[in-house]
Amino acid sequence: MANQVEAAGATTAVPAARTGCPVTGYGRSGGHPPPPGVADERRPEPVDPAAAEEFLHQVYAETEPETPLAERLRQVRAEIDRSGTYRHTAHELVFGARVAWRNSARCIGRLYWQSLQVRDLRHLHDPADVAQECVAHLRAATRDGKIRSTMTVFAPDAPGRPGPRIRNDQLVRYAGHRAADGSVIGDPGQADFTDRVAGLGWPRPQPPGRFDVLPLLITGGDGRSRLFDVPPDAVHEVPLRHPDHAWFARLGLRWHAVPAISNMPLEIGGVVYPAAPFNGWYLDTEIGARNLADRDRYDLLPEIADRLGLDTRSERTMWRDRALVELVRAVTYSFDADGVTMADHHTESERFLRHLAREEAAGRSCPTDWSWIVPPMSGAQTPVFHRYYDEPDPALRPAFLAPPREW
Ligand code: ARG
């Protein structure tokens, strides 16, 4: 077995055994024992019965399960008494996952919350199985460009048996390779993570590129972490070009089709699913006005402004603003031309207000974080800018949680 990598703990490097075989498949099985004393152990708490009950009441208030509520409450209480946790029915899992999306105060795309497809893989604990199903998730969600909102749920935390965790913040991310002079080739936002996986034995592509897909770093319930490649044919990418400027394509820019967040634990009725990657589809500005434009990301505006012939000597020429519009146009144009689902900030803002109205009609509050919902360009040109919202409530459940710092 070539290029196996196995490590204990988040930051512990174990030299990889390399035999010169292609990297695909390293970490599949076997590997080095973890160095002593560094196991990355977690001790999940028993489920709070009150959280379980509150969730079940919500399930029965909004949907009509077959089992009567009183009976289901008895089952769940008994299961928690016995084992410290309980198993959601498939119906509860899907409902909980969808409501966690509905509760996501930073998401502008929540109109579609009921369409989330849930892949129930709660029986999977082993990092190799998790990796394989993350890849299958990407294929199922991509559908040749007709992106479908999808979540894959792996084993939950249970007392005495933590679930697996995905350490990447998204299933697909581009490496940030730090050069000797401090500059970064690729995505500077991933430079720390790239150093980490390289330290664990990831063989960086040679020469390092600007769009090298990072491997998955997955920690099993035993605290041992392993690396797995994401096969290129599971990563749909769009080469970026501009409707009016032929030179734009020659910049060699690209972006992947599926944004799949992978490090936010999902909490439903007191049960925590530490690995529950989920995706929607991209909004034009996420790529064009942030990932490729932010000064601490790809920082492409100076180069694009230059090619556009703009005067970059003074901020007052608004060269940044003008270059930004053309970059976002190129992103939207390229995704459209390739038939890959992409939202635009004007349309999605209107849809979000429709969602808000629907939630209000259903008698629910819709927690919303203004600073995340208002697009990073042309804010006041979109209707979401011109109003206030219900404050996000950190105690609201079901929810996607911020990854705990100690992870
Ligand atoms: N902003 C993140 C990115 O650019 C993706 C976050 C999720 N976005 C989405 N449309 N579901 O990669």
Image (spheres, grey):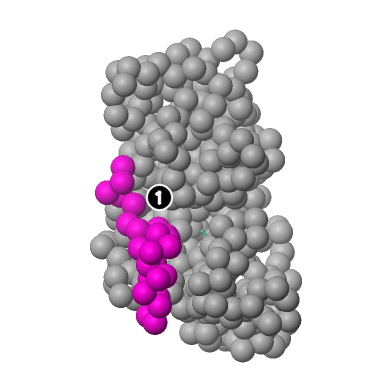
SS label for mark 1: strand
Tell me where residue 44 appears, x and y as whole percent. Answer: 61, 33
The residue at 56%/57% (across/down) is 298
Residue 312 appears in the rendering: yes
Tell me where residue 161 appears, x and y as whole percent. Answer: 53, 28
Depth check, front residue: 106 or 20:
20
For residue 8, above or below residue 95: above
Depth check, front residue: 26 or 58:
26
253 magenta-colored: yes
Tell me where residue 260 appears, x and y as whole percent. Answer: 45, 55
For residue 114, above or below residue 180: below
The residue under label 1 is 152
The residue at 29%/53% (across/down) is 139
The region drawn magenta spans 231-257
For residue 149, above or below residue 212: below
Q: Give the total of numbered labels.
A: 1
Tell me where residue 212 appears, x and y as whole percent. Answer: 42, 45
- Is 175 situated left or right of 252 in this image? right
Determine crowd level at label 1: few under 14, some 14-19, many 20+ residues with C-alpha closer than 10 A.
Answer: many
Residue 342 appears in the rendering: no
Quadrant in the picture for the C terminus: top right
Quadrant in the picture for the N terminus: top left
For residue 145, above or below residue 156: below
The residue at 44%/19% (across/down) is 16
The residue at 57%/32% (across/down) is 196
| Distance from mark 1 CB to nearest ligand 1 atom below 8 Å | no
Quarter where residue 295 is shown: bottom right
Quarter where residue 236 is shown: bottom left
Residue type (three-letter) at the residue carrying disc 1 = Thr
139 magenta-colored: no
Depth check, front residue: 221 or 106:
106
